[in-house]
Image: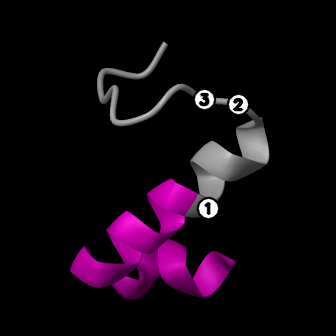
Amino acid sequence: MKKRSLTPPVNVGDVVEVRIEAVGEKGDGIGKIK
């Protein structure tokens, strides 16, 4: 389980999208991967 519990993980894709957006703001490293 992830340490961050913002919202219940419905689908893996959903969590990945949220993480990419959050990381994209701080660094474009993962943002470019999407």
State whether residue 3 is above or below residue 24.
above
Question: In the image shown, does 14 or 24 lie closer to the viewer?
Answer: 14
Q: Can you give x and y, in whole percent of width and height, for residue 14 in the image? A: 68, 49
What kind of element bears circle 2? loop
Mark seen at residue 9: 3
CA neighbours of label 1 inside 10 A, class few (<14), some (14 to 19), many (20+): few
Locate residue 17: give its quadrant: bottom right
Residue under label 1, please give it. 17
Mark seen at residue 10: 2
CA neighbours of label 3 inside 10 A, class few (<14), some (14 to 19), many (20+): few
Question: In the image shown, does 6 or 12 lie closer to the viewer?
Answer: 6
* Closer to the eye: label 1 or 2: 2
Question: In the image shown, does 7 or 3 lie closer to the viewer?
Answer: 7
Which amino acid type corresponds to the residue marked 3 in the rendered image?
A: Pro
Is residue 3 on the magenta stretch?
no
| Separation (CA) of disc 3 from disc 2 | 4 Å
Residue lying at 76% horizontally and 36% vertically, measured from the top left: 11
Question: In the image shown, does 27 or 15 lie closer to the viewer?
Answer: 15
| Separation (CA) of disc 1 from disc 3 | 11 Å
Dominant SS in magenta = helix
Quadrant of the snapshot with the C terminus: bottom right
Q: Which segment did they paint magenta?
A: 18-34
Tell me, yes or no, whether the two marked residues, 3 and 2, touch with CB atoms within 8 Å.
yes
